[in-house]
Structure formats: C-alpha cells, structure tokens
Amino acid sequence: MVRFFLYALAALLTLAVVGYFTVAAPIADGRFNQVGGTVEGPVSERARAVHDTLMVADLHNDLLLWPRDPLARYDRGHTDVPRLREGGVGLQVFAAVTQVPTGRSYQGTDADALDQIPFLVAAQRWPPRTWTSRLHRALYQAQKLRRAVDRDDQLSIIRTRDDLARVRERRRAQPDVMGTLLAVEGLHALEGDAANVDRLVDAGYRMMSLTHLHDNALGGSSTGLEKGGLTEFGADVLTRLQKHNVTIGLAHASEALIDDVLARTTEPVVVSHTGVRATCDSPRNLSDRHIEAIAEQGGVIGIGIWESALCGDTPAATAHAMRHVADLVGVEHVALGTDFDGTVSVPFDATGLPHLTDALLDAGFSPDEVRQIMSGNVRRVLGRTLPDES
Ligand SMILES: [Zn+2]
C-alpha cells in the first residue's frame, strides 16, 4: 500500500515537472497576450488602399519573451513574423523584458517583489544562466532574433542608418522585406555595471529605456514606488548610451526622470509605447507638458493599442490619442507603439493593423498624415539617432 502510494506520488511529480517544461509557458503566453477589443466591420476599401502603400513601423513588441519561433505562424498571442508581414509591418522594434515583479500595478510596483521572469524562461528551457541573470536574458533574446534572421533572407536586424536605408530600398521591390531593431526595456538589465552597455550594443541593441515597471538603480519608473529622477549611476549610463548613439527611450519613465533625461539630451528621444493623460488619465501616460518637451527636441511618441493606455478597446481610441498629440505638437511627432505581446489585451493581432489605418482616416488624418504616423516619423528619427556605422 505504502509502495503504491510512493509510486503514484513519483508519477505525479514527474508529470508536474514534464508539464512545467513543456506546456506551462505556452499556456501563460495564451493567457497573458489576448485579443479582446472591439473592431467594427471589415476594413474600408479606401483604408485598404492606403494601408497597402505603408511600410508600417511599430516601436514596441515583446514577442522575444514568449515561447514562439518568430518565423512560425501561431494562433495565440499577437505577433510572429508571418502575421506582422500580413499586417504590413516593415520595421519592428523588438524589446527585451528582463524583470517583471509580482503584484505589479500602475499604482506602484515594488522592485523587490518576486520576479516572474525566471519561472517563464526556465519553463521555456532557456539556458540556466538566464534563470538568474537579467543581462543574459537580454543577450539571449537578441540571439533568438539573430537565429530567426539567419533563417530568413528578407528579415534583418538594423544596426546603422545604412541598414535602415537598405531595408527601405529593398522593400520597394519585395514587400516581405522587414527590418527589426533591438531595444531593452529597462536597464536593470545592466545588473549595476555601466560597462554592460557595451555588451548590449555588441549584441545589436540600438534603443534602450532606462526604467521599466519598477524604480531601478538608474532612476524612477512611472509605476514605481518612489518615482524619482535620474541617479548618478543613471547619468553615467546615459553618457555611455550617447557615446554609442543608442536611441533613448522614455516609455515607463517617471515624470522626474523624463525631466532629467531631457535636460541632458539634445538628440530626439522616443516614447516607444504610451497613452496620453488628456484622453486617459493614468500615471503610465504622458502629460501634455512632456509631449511638448519631447516634440520640442524632435522626438516621437508611439501611441499604443492596449486598453489601459487608452481607456478604450477600439482602434478609434488609439486614433483619438494620436489626434490629441497631433493637435498639440504636430503630426510629425506621432507614431505607433503597439505593445503587442506585452501581457496586454489588444483589439486585433498584427494582421488587423489595417483597422488602425481605417480609424486614422475616420479621425480626419489625410493619407499622407497616416503615412507619417504609421511609418515616416519613426524612420526620420532613427535616421538621425542610429549610428553611421556599427
Ligand atoms: Zn512596456
């Protein structure tokens, strides 16, 4: 009897371990990255015609964190390369997430709370050093993208201005050509060592935001507990980023940190994925004062498509926030930053992007303005901030 009980227990434990290393991550993927908004009717013929001319540039996507081969097509989550291509995306920024504290919220996220990422990456059987090292989580995500690029002739990683120009040029003849750009979401990935900036740059990273969901050694997060400004270490790192021509991201930065970074930069900055307080009042979203300051410096503001950034779950809600920024500072500062696969709920997966073009036309933007928002503004800024050569 005792022996039977022990065998049963061992069998159950084995099943639990096998389950954890096989199905747990895909289940989490499907649960956290849902399509759940409201999209009305088919896309209009007019919008379809405009959308077909676009090389859509999306400033933020977290695909690399999830158990999906970027080149395969899935029916869960928001994106993969086939679906991005179908949605007209020609330039995709992929961000590396390296820490997500348990119990996070827009009201205040504790940096010391249990990190969920080790459980997610171990379940995907990432190399053991990624289980304990945030730096290695970022390096591994870059490697994942490089391996995908190696298997697809029309996919590339943009490291320089020339790379960007080449993608644009090749895409004129081949609509499947897609350039990607690597970004880090929060420089706690440096693990306290500014010299690790060089390792991330070597791995291909060209855009970095200082903070993510929680305050870190560089400065405050918009959803952190203290929400402070730039620290001395943050200032050191910023100098290093500037030396490497890394594009500075300000999504998730506290108000004090935005002020401090803008005071120390002259190049355009990017807010890769955000909402605006004027249409959705949340600490995670940008104030009009900061929209003006970022525009003043030539930057772009990537408006998201997820519910809690917009206080709405429709493409029209994104168009409404974009309209606010355009009316306040000019359409040349508006961009798209979906936050696809960023543990958010969105109204459509990547194949549904024509719905957004439709909503922008409905909001009164001209086809030329739609081209600026969905593509041209990001290319203009990256054309200025990317290094000349790697
Ligand atoms: Zn984010």
Image: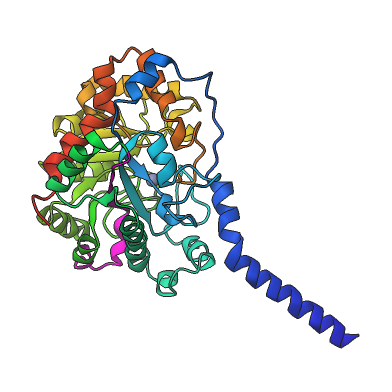
Q: If the picture is divided into quarters, which one holds ligand 1?
A: top left
- Number of marks in the rendered image: 0
The answer to whether 164 appears left or right of 85 in the picture is left
* The furthest residue to the front: 173
Return the residue found at the far bottom: 3
Residue at x 32%, y 19% (from the top left corner): 323
Which residue does the image show at 24% across and 42% down from the upper left?
258
Q: Position of residue 214 (x, y in %)?
A: 39, 53
Q: Position of residue 285 (x, y in %)?
A: 37, 34
Q: Position of residue 65 (x, y in %)?
A: 43, 56
Answer with left or right where residue 158 lies relative to residue 48. left
Q: Which residues are magenta?
A: 176-197
Tell me: 9 left or right of 245. right
Q: Is residue 238 above or below residue 105?
A: below
Q: Nearer the viewer, residue 108 or 145?
A: 145
Which of the 4 quarters of the picture holds residue 316? Answer: top left
Query: Is 310 colored magenta in this rendering?
Result: no
Q: Residue at x 33, y 53 (%)?
A: 152
Question: What residue occupies the far right of the structure in this picture?
Answer: 1
Residue for point 54% across, 30% down: 37
Q: Is residue 2 above or below residue 262?
A: below
* Any part of residue 162 in sight: yes
Along the viewing direction, whichever of 334 and 19 lies nearer the viewer: 19
Instruction: Judge whether residue 283 can be spotted in this image.
Output: no
- Classify the position of the C terminus by image quarter: bottom left
Residue 56 location, quadrant = top left
Q: Is residue 195 magenta?
A: yes
Q: Quadrant of the N terminus?
A: bottom right
